[in-house]
Image (cartoon, rainbow, N blue to C red):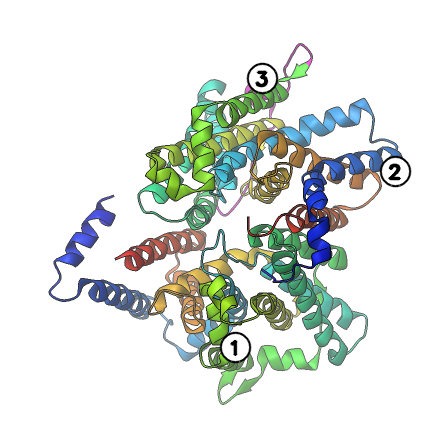
Amino acid sequence: MTNQTDTAVRESRFSLEAASNYAVIVAFVAVVIFFTFAAPGFMTGENIFNLISNKVVLLAIVALGMTIVIGAGGIDLSVGVSIDLSSMIFIMMIAAGYMGAFAVMGGLGAAFCVGLLNAFLINKLKINPFLATLGVLFIGKSIQQLSTQGGVPIYLTRAEYAAPFDAIARTSLLGIPTPMIILVICIIGVYLALHRSVFGRYVAALGAQADVARYSGIRVPMHMSIVFISCAVLSGITGILLSSTVRSYVPLAGDAFLLDAIGATFIGTAISAERRPSVLGTLIGVALLAVMRNGLLLIGWNFFWQQVGIGVLVFLVLGLSFGLRKRGE
Amino acid sequence: MTAVEHAPAAANRGWFNSKIFAKLAIRLGAFAAFAGILIYFALTARGFTSSYNLINVVEQSTILGFLAFAMTVVFIGTGTDVQKGGIDLSIAANAGLCAAVYAVMMREGYGNFVAIPAAVGTGMVIGFFNGLAVVTLKIMPLLGTLAVMNIAAGLELTLTENTVVPVQSDLMNVLAFGRFLGVSTLAWCLIIGSALLIWAIHFSRIGLRLYAVGGHIEAARAAGIRTGAYIYGAYIFSGFMAGVASILIVSRLSSSTPGTGLMLLPILAAALLGTVFSRRFIPTIGGTLLAALFIGFLANGFQLLGISSYWVSGVQGALILLVVTVTSFAKKH
């Protein structure tokens, strides 16, 4: 944007640019080391385990979905709607006495519909993804308010409902809790799709040069549909995990994930020289946000200061990573 | 599918230049839809046309309007592609922070002469950080302003500890309850503010250059415009408007209240809907003013008709989608 290219800056740019690729990793390591010394309870097995199973799993699954969408050059502001509607249908079906498996299918089906609506708006009506998913975000809010008398949460804490929730949130396989296994499956699935398949190459092409991708014969609408539906369904999985953990549906609870998911994905782009989203980068972004929040809590910062601290950190990391990048790229 | 494919065919069969005809139809259609909805409310909703109610809606739209103007100026200066171009996600959180600064300083006994410059100054500092992120550090606007939004929202919470901070002052009574020529102060603020901005953006050199920067940044730079300074300016102005709006928010509510950040979505809706009222479907101050009033009248009419307010957000969403579909069709053909 500015025209200033000092010769001094230009000379030192080569090394700075290489260094900028490591800004996030350096920040992550620094943050972990800092909290290890500053917060006594941080580097304990129990704390790390809780951190991963409570905070990281939910955000990471949404962020994986966001990674696919941003990788394809789009953005999905409606992940909160997918989370909430999936959670709402899931809880309502459990309350109505359906079997757990059906309720899960119902929830994921609702999320699928959100993705389908996004895909319709983007492919058929040619609305840009930001505006299309913004519209869906508004509509999703209304749907939730209308079906819950303005936002009354549904709590299913009575013992008779416990079975399906426990089956999802409280079981474990070989000592690993089920939600963590689901996360690992999602990571492997998205990794294979994005980084080890033809689909992933097409998505990368769409993200880099949508017009070129279209002229080289990539079926853009079909791939965009898959991208947005995958993101919605992944968010739906988070919705069901969230509901199973807290045994309730709180309207508009999913909105909290939107900014963190976008933030984590873009922080993650800083590890690649081309500033492209990747599964590994996103996971580092999610971990960075989770560690910051947990560490700041442990050293006694309240929720409000945590938000300031995280905002400043994200600003600095992005500033380092983007500010040192080569111009005119 | 059908809508998109049939519409151009119909336009091509028009009796005269189909391109102009289609654009004209859409523009008139936007005004007609606005007028039609107003007439419908006037006929069905009792009390809608009373002067008390009309002024009330204008008052309610003042704050939304000011913040939507800020977003419009950012859109103008950084291009209308919200994804790759510019956007200021921090406006609403910034207004909340300014309101908190103002309310807390008033509570601590500083007068209006200190508290108001402090609040507006806070807004401009936050705006400066947006400029720093976008222009100097070259962070994508969507991301840079997102990080700033988090910082502003966090600072607001630390200042107020997430509570309502009540404020009393003479100036606020004038702003909230004062009247001049039968019109309330808040409504005057909207009228004067829009007039000044319409002059600055649409009838001054600065405004023209701002459009040039947003329209094609390389061309603007080649023409000798200091593009970076204009984008910085747009973000700082946006912060300034957030500061001004925060004083109005505090006056209207007699307090600084958590939750101002939630206004981001209506602000975006107003700024985006506004483009449909302009000839080339670009952001304009007049268009945003109409859109902000439209959103206000819509919510008010729903209320008077006894329709649940839960529909409002959905209708806004559907309107955005409709407007964007129609304008992108009109731009293409």
Q: Identify the secondary structure beneath mark 1.
A: helix
x and y percent of residue A234 in the render?
51, 30
Tag on residue A167? 3
x and y percent of residue A136 in the render?
43, 46
Q: Is residue B177 above or below residue A3?
A: below
Q: Categorize mark 1 by other alpha carbons within 10 Å: few (<14), some (14-19), many (20+).
A: few
Residue B65 makes an appearance in the image: yes
- The answer to which of marks 3 and 2 sits earlier in the sequence is 2
Q: Categorize mark 2 by other alpha carbons within 10 Å: few (<14), some (14-19), many (20+).
A: some
Please give the residue where the numbered disc 2 appears in the rendered image. A38
Asked if residue A267 lies in the magenta stretch, the reply is no
Specify the farthest residue to the top. Answer: A174
Q: State which mark lies toward you, 1 or 2.
A: 1
Q: What is the spatial separation of the Cα atoms under label 1 and label 3, in whole angstroms?
A: 63 Å
Tag on residue B206? 1
Tag on residue B6? none
Residue B162 makes an appearance in the image: no
**Chain letter of disc 3?**
A
Left or right side of A265 for B52: left
Q: Is residue B166 above or below residue A281?
A: below
Q: Magenta residues?
A: A149-175
**Chain letter of disc 2?**
A
Quadrant location of residue A295? top right
Residues tagged 1 and 2 counted as in contact (Cβ below 8 A): no
x and y percent of residue B83 in the render?
49, 51
- Callout 1 and callout 2 share a chain: no
- The residue shown at (75%, 37%) is A26
x and y percent of residue A152 in the render?
54, 43
Residues tagged 3 and 2 counted as in contact (Cβ below 8 A): no
